[in-house]
Each structure stands twice: as structure tokens, then as C-alpha cells.
Amino acid sequence: MTFYDPETEQKARRTLKFINRAMIPLWRLGLGGWLNFWPKVGGRIMVIVHTGRKSGKRRYNNVNYSIINGDIYCTAGFGSITDWYRNILNNPNVEVWLPDGWWNGIAEDVSYDQNRLNILRQVLIDSGFAARAMGIEAATIPAEVLERVTQDYRLVRIRRTAARTGAGGPGNLAWVWPLSTFILLGLLIFRPRHGKKG
């Protein structure tokens, strides 16, 4: 039985980078809940908002996650070179956009936690197709193989500190939907009508 395929992992990394770029606009359009409608297949997806360590600007990344004992766990599957991971090491104050809310939080690297492997396995299981796309059968892979193939992965815990509301969060572009509907209805109602020529 195959638990891990390195060739599949390399192909998946390229594909997942492309998919990730499309996710943030969907969250902004208010579709975060829809992206999480079938977590066993599509995975549990959230957005982490962090501060660029060089630019000081807000940065957005979607990541898979698990909630364990009230804390949010996610992994930087590209290891310590992952930009968002490096940013949170520099400034651990983050925001998280979850399907059921928007939160401030404090992020910390827990890659050396004694429970790391069990938590990481759960995050990978909760990633749905993403772990399988990386060539990892998270639910059945033996612990020693999981340890080896994820040795570069960074495990991050986020502790929520306060609920957020207001402008600039998930769904901040949801106004596009009623506007688009209004414009489309207008085009349908006022479209030129061509009579039949006799």
C-alpha cells in the first residue's frame, strides 16, 4: 500500500499555489462558507491575515486548519521558507477568517510540541483533497512515515483573542452580488427587441 508519493507532491505544489490565489477573492465575495460546505472532500479552509515582514502591508493566505481544544492549528507545508510563516514569526498578531466568524489571534510555532505528529495528522486529514494531492494518505500513513515526509512542515497554533466585525474582513465585496443582479436584470428588461420581418 502506498502512503506517500514524492512525485505527486511536486506536481501538487504547483497546482495548489495556483488554486490558493483564487481563494482570497472568493472569501472577499462572501463565499467562505461555500468553500467549506463539504470538508471531508474540499477540506477545512480559512484565511490567515498577517503583516509582511518587509513591506508592513496586510497579506492574505488561505490554509487548511483544525480546531483542537478551542485553538486553531494549521501547517506551512512548504516549510520554513513559506512567506506567511516567516511573517508570523516576525509579527504573531494575525486575523483569521473562519466559515463562522472573523477573529484576532496570536500565532506561534509549535513544530516541536510533543503532540506535533498527532495534531499534524489531524490538520492533514482536515485538509481534505489537499493532503491526498500532496501524495499523503493522512488517515492511514504510519507515524514513522508521516514523521519523515513532514519533517520540514511547520505547525502553527493560533489562539483567538477577540471577535472582529466591521469593514475589511471576509465578505467585504459581497455588495458585488446585488449590484450584478441589478445590472443583469436591467439588461434583460431593457434589451433591444427585434421584431420579425415579414
Image (tube, rainbow, N blue to C red):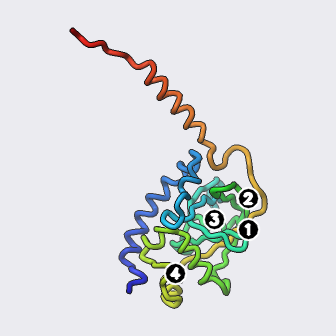
In the image, 36 versus 145, the foreground residue is 36
Q: Residue at x 56, y 49 (%)?
A: 31
Q: Which residue is mark 1?
A: 159
Q: What kind of residue is marked 3?
A: Asn
Name the image quarter holding residue 133. Answer: bottom left
Q: Earlier in the sequence, mark 3 or mark 1?
A: 3
Q: Which residue is mark 4?
A: 150
Q: Residue at x 78, y 62 (%)?
A: 161
Q: Nearer the viewer, mark 2 or mark 3?
A: 2
Q: Which residue is mark 2?
A: 104
Name the image quarter holding residue 85. Answer: bottom right
In the image, 150 versus 163, the foreground residue is 163
Q: Earlier in the sequence, mark 2 or mark 1?
A: 2
Crowd rating for badge 3 (residues with CA inside 10 Å; few <14, some 14–19, many 20+): some
Name the image quarter holding residue 82. Answer: bottom right
Point out which mark residue 87 bears: 3
Q: Earlier in the sequence, mark 2 or mark 3?
A: 3
- Locate the C terminus by quadrant: top left
Image position, residue 187 (x, y; %): 44, 24
Q: Is residue 51 visible?
A: no
Secondary structure at numbered mark 3: helix
- Locate the N terminus by quadrant: bottom left
Secondary structure at numbered mark 2: strand
Q: Is residue 110 visible?
A: yes
Crowd rating for badge 2 (residues with CA inside 10 Å; few <14, some 14–19, many 20+): some
Image position, residue 156 (x, y; %): 64, 72
